[in-house]
Image (cartoon, rainbow, N blue to C red):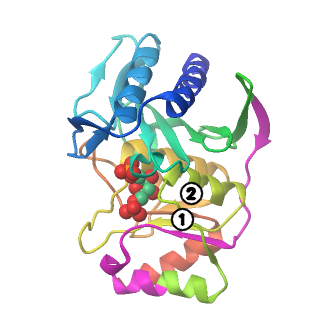
Amino acid sequence: MQEIFEKIEEIALEIDNLIKTAEGGYSDHSNSTGDVQLKLDILSDEIIEQKLSSVKTIGSLISEEKENILEVSSSGKYTVCYDPLDGSSIVDYNLSVGSIFGIYENGLNAENIVASVYIVYGPRVEMVKTLKGSKPEHYRLVGTKFLNLGTITMQESGKINAPGGTQKNWYPYHKLLIDSLFQDGYRLRYSGGMVPDLHQVLLKGGGLFSYPGTTDKPKGKLRDLFEVIPFALTFIEAGGEAIDEHGLSLLGIKPEHPHDTTPCFFGSKYEIAKVKEAYANA
Ligand code: AFP
């Protein structure tokens, strides 16, 4: 695992440099789910594949940008699933974006995730590493080294509300939930990048990030293996909660296809209890 973490640190430095120096805009290619890829998406994906395919403990790689699984070593026990550059629609407007990695052992179910790492490319570059059974560790890039800033622990409740999805397509019970949090004094914090948005909820110790099922996308937008499950591990190990629209832990989901999506809610205990209440009779 240590070697995987070291490679991810090298990847973070390279992608950060790419974001700052490479050409923006769209390429002529689409990814497996039909999204037109940015030039930065393609280059970030290449960096990760090149760095991780030499690690002997990794058996296979699955990129959010590709349809197929890449087998890299027959002796490797881990599968690494990654979203090379999450936030394609905002990176060219200079908002913060991120990379997300989920490390799985013995099959691609949420219960088999053993570690997750995400990197936020913002005014600062920060990384959060979570090993199953341990508190998430928070790092900041200083020069070319990641400095450990300590562990992350969530409080019982927070003050921020990050509601994803197109509002006109929200189900009425979801709208009532979001409105009730604002009525209670919660403040809107939503950039359109799940990495910085979830990072903010975590570091502020509480609040709610939601990406619900909607009338146009009943299964939500965020992808299980690359986005939902890695962040579920981080939130749960930090003492928060991560649930689906049935109120069940996101660490229980069993994707049928690598690109499956699930409606998801990440937050501190108080706000997640509110979600369960709002969705109980949905
Ligand atoms: P892109 O990579 O296509 O920009 O999507 C980013 C993202 O997957 C995630 O980072 C955001 O939380 C979510 O989409 C935002 O989606 P909405 O614009 O529908 O709220």
Amino acid on which disc 1 is placed: Tyr
Residue at 55 percent across and 19 percent down: it is 7
Amino acid on which disc 2 is placed: Asp
Disc sitting over residue 197 in the figure: 2
Q: How many marks do you count on the picture?
A: 2
* Magenta region, residue range: 147-176
Q: Position of residue 113 (x, y in %)?
A: 47, 38
In depth, the one of 29 and 149 nearer the eye is 29
Q: Position of residue 165 (x, y in %)?
A: 38, 68
Say whether residue 83 is left or right of residue 275: left
In depth, the one of 138 and 120 nearer the eye is 120
Query: Considering the numbered disc 2 on the image, is that residue within a helix, a strand or a loop?
Result: helix
- Can you see residue 4? yes
Between the C-alphas of marks 2 and 1, the distance is 6 Å
Q: Earlier in the sequence, mark 2 or mark 1?
A: 1
Look at the image and say whether residue 39 sits in the magenta stretch.
no
| 153, above or below 186, in the image | above
In depth, the one of 94 and 78 nearer the eye is 94
Q: Position of residue 275 (x, y in %)?
A: 50, 76
| Residue linked to disc 1 | 190
| 109, above or below 262, in the image | above
> Badge 1: how crowded within 10 Å, few (<14), some, or many (20+)?
some
- Can you see residue 253? no
The answer to whether mark 1 is within 8 Å of ligand 1 is yes
Q: Quadrant of residue 68?
A: top left
The answer to whether mark 2 is within 8 Å of ligand 1 is yes
Look at the image and say whether residue 174 sits in the magenta stretch.
yes
> Badge 2: how crowded within 10 Å, few (<14), some, or many (20+)?
many
Residue at 36 percent across and 86 percent down: it is 172
* Label 2–label 1 contact, CB within 8 A: yes
Query: Considering the numbered disc 1 on the image, is that residue within a helix, a strand or a loop?
Result: loop
Q: Quadrant of ligand 1?
A: bottom left
